[in-house]
Amino acid sequence: MSPSAPRARPALLLLVWTILGASTDAKYASGARRSGHRLSTEPLEERQAASVTQCLALCGALTDCVALNFGTITYTANCQLLGQRACDGLPLVADAAVNYYDVYDEPQNGTSERQMPFWDDPGCVQDGYCAAECAAKAAGDFCTVDAHCRAHPKPSSVYGCSNSTCQPSADFWEMRPGVALPRWQLWRLDPFQWAWKKLKPGTCSLDVSLKLGVGAVAHISACWLSQHIGTRLTFRFTNSVMDLYYSDSASTLHYLVLGVNIDGMVNSDTYSLLKISWCGGNMAIGPASNPTLVTAYASVSQSIDFVMVYSANADSWMTVDSGVADPWLFEESGVATDAVITVPSDSYVHRRITATRSLTLKFDCKALRDCAVRFRGETRVALNVVIGGWDNTATGLIYYGDIGGQFHVVSSAVLSDTEFNTFTVHYNNGSITVYHNEAATPFYTATAPHAMPDITLIGIGSCCGPKTIRVARYDPAWRTDTWLTEGSGYSNGDEPEPAP
């Protein structure tokens, strides 16, 4: 039974809401909505009271009393003092001679409870609003105990009841209603391409901790889309100077400030705490102690829904307190056991692996063209196996290093933007073999044109339009559903620095 489903209200729901206070301990009882019900549990005490107000006063005298049943109970008792509430998973039993009351220390708790939508559902009144169908859905919902917050929000272990509202623990933040992620997620800034994450709606500032790669030029851009079009507000900096510029809705570039001295703000030895903001087009960046060290104004006419990052010349590393996550995590299909991941154009999803010279990567891809696999080591050398490249006419290698270029291109139209195709890519010390769907023989074989280092990063993506991929079904290291159950899972860019 859904709390939001329209239903005819039973008579007990039409009774006047009452809050009864006991002057000695300032206790408050709420229970008109539970008229004609009693909580089935062993009481702390059974007493005879002249009124429900006196019964409440007796409850206030007991440290552990959090609820009460009042009415015709036994020949000698009409007041049961209870150490548990209906929200502790206990049944409320229909009994016309008894009324059940929750007991609170503050009157606003009863007011909050009265306003909750579960009272529209008779089943929630009878079974208690901690029943799964009546429980809290997200942070901010009313609660009295932790159990109220753990039926729906995920991961359930990190949610609890604080000050009568459901909240994730201090180490987590709520990405979307009922789904929390750990704070200070790691995000590697790649030297080969931009990487995107989606902003939680309403976010216009980020607290980050950044370590700049040696000789790197970091780019952090708040943008309209996960594409290189439309509004993009860019913070570009080295360890000594900062540039602020933006592209407007027509993608016209506007430079705002260039070459501002920021010596000491970031370095390549330690992580530096920074605050970056762009609220209302007011761009600002600086250390946590001086968040407006560099400022400028950008004329913004489009919403800012994504952040993209890039680190020219060398990898950089950044942890982000909250506010951004992989775009697919905002969708139910992106946190399923067999997650569907959409990779933006001109980007990759990466995963760090143990250094190796032999590996296999199997995945499903739906794309119009260019579904590439990237093999990388710790040096700035990368090898792309471009499947369905060149407008889905060929497959070949692209080598990035001191000597770059395209190699071993063969004709192959193997991609579709309407259905998934499966590819199995074997890599062995620079030798490449690619299988299509379940074919027994490869449709592509090649050898890297130059020596390759040990592979420590593998990625899927490339240029020329988005790709929809499935890979967790073949390798659990890519699973995202574990964010909901374990509070951890695959995150693009969650790749620690290599050991020195």
Image (cartoon, grey):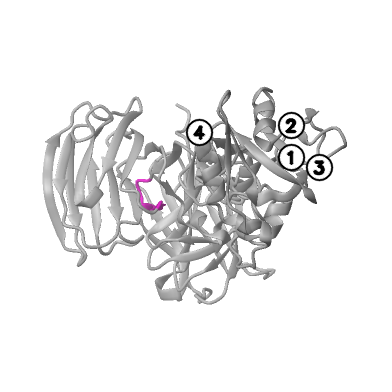
Q: CB of mark 1 within 8 Å of CB of mark 2?
A: yes
Q: What is the distance, in whole Å, between disc 1 and disc 2 at their CAs? A: 9 Å
Q: What is the distance, in whole Å, between disc 1 and disc 3 at their CAs? A: 7 Å
Which of disc 4 and disc 3 is earlier in sequence? Answer: 3
The amino acid type of the residue labelled 4 equals Asp
Residue 328 rendering spot, x and y as whole percentages? 50, 57
Q: What residue does disc 1 label?
A: 70
- The residue located at (29%, 36%) in the rendering is 275
The amino acid type of the residue labelled 1 equals Phe
Q: What residue does disc 2 label?
A: 49
The amino acid type of the residue labelled 2 equals Ala
> Callout 2 environment at 10 Å: few (<14), some (14 to 19), or many (20+)?
some
Residue 497 within the segment the image draws in magenta: no
Q: Nearer the viewer, mark 4 or mark 2?
A: 2
In the picture provided, is 9 more to the left or to the right than 299?
right
| Mark 2 secondary-structure assignment | loop
Q: Nearer the viewer, mark 3 or mark 4?
A: 3
Which of disc 2 and disc 1 is earlier in sequence? Answer: 2
| Mark 1 secondary-structure assignment | strand
Q: Which of the image's four quarters has the N terminus?
A: bottom right
* Residue 344 occupies quadrant: bottom left
| Mark 4 secondary-structure assignment | loop
Q: What is the distance, in whole Å, between disc 4 and disc 2 at their CAs? A: 46 Å
Q: Which residues are the magenta region?
A: 190-200
Q: What residue does disc 3 label?
A: 72
In the picture provided, is 92 more to the left or to the right than 145?
right
Which dot marks residue 495?
A: none
> Callout 1 environment at 10 Å: few (<14), some (14 to 19), or many (20+)?
many
Q: Which of the image's four quarters has the C terminus?
A: top left
- The residue located at (56%, 46%) in the rendering is 113
Q: CB of mark 3 within 8 Å of CB of mark 4?
A: no
Q: CB of mark 1 within 8 Å of CB of mark 3?
A: no
